[in-house]
Amino acid sequence: MKLPFRIKFDAPAAGYVGYTAFFLMCLVFFAALSFPYDRLRDFAVQQVAESAPASDAAPPRRLAIGEIGPTWSLGVALTDVAFEQDAAQPGSMPVALKIDELTIRPSLLSLLIGRTRVGFDAAIGDGSIDGTFEAVGGEWSLDAELEAVDLGKLGLGGLAGIPVAGIASGEVDLAASDEPASDEGAIQLNIEGVVLGDGKAKVALPGMGQGLTVEPIRAGDLEVQIRLHEGVAALDKVHARGADLAFDAGGAVRLGRPFASSRVDLTLELKFADAFKERN
């Protein structure tokens, strides 16, 4: 079969294409190297500090970044990232989240079409969190995979209100918008060696201004399966059996905006071991 036309590349044309590609590659490479990363760090720190509600009672927020620089994948690499927020009330725990290494990879193509798409990799101790965050308009989605994440090193206890230790693995897949009824997704986690409390930190309780010190509670391995559909988070399975505590949770939460307006319909069964009750 003969084509009705011919395509011919001569040596000069091929050279022009090669030179152009090489020039663009060098441009991107040296732009990444010369980017003012220190200014980017200062900007991020300032934005976090200014994100706290404008109220005298609102605790301040602080972000610290050890080092920041480029990566081979046109992303940004950060080390020793720490987010802190003072306790909201006397006797409660402050928030202190720490990540050893964090890599952020924004998608330039998505930005050109009005979307935000960011890939991220986080290292916490010997574990990791890998995922993607997307946002457009009032909609956002998060897809993340956890592998052997040390919750104690991460500092999850500050968000939970009680010290939490354990090694978490699993998947988080969420999609939400300004309308709670459109929220969809699923959370599946397995947390090995869960321990609640550390015998030092105070847990805020109503009527106790100074909080309550909780001795370590060994809750064993925790399995969590949550299904989110049309704005309702159903607890399909929340189950743990430990040396000090056994518990099961079920029910559902109809999400609201703000989250504090959510409607909660949950059951929680707790059983402490006799040996733990004798010690405490």
Image (cartoon, grey):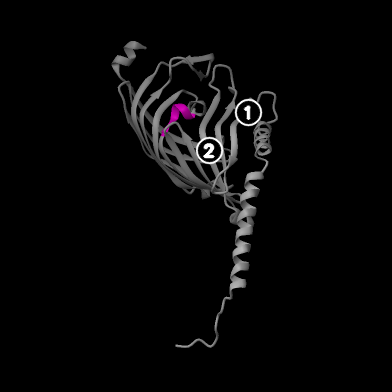
For disc 2, the marked residue is 102
* Camera-nearest residue between 145 and 60: 145
* Camera-nearest residue between 251 and 52: 52
**Residue 80 is inside the magenta segment:** no
**SS at mark 2?**
strand
Q: How far apart are labels 2 and 1 at the CA level? A: 19 Å
In this orientation, does residue 263 appear? yes
Label annotation for residue 61: 1
Q: Position of residue 103 (x, y in %)?
A: 53, 41
Q: Quadrant of residue 42?
A: top right
* Camera-nearest residue between 197 and 36: 36
Residue depicted at x 63% and y 57% = 112
- The type of residue carrying mark 1 is Arg
Residue depicted at x 42% and y 35% = 127
Horizontally, is 57 left or right of 172 in the view?
A: right
Report the quarter where the C terminus lies: top left
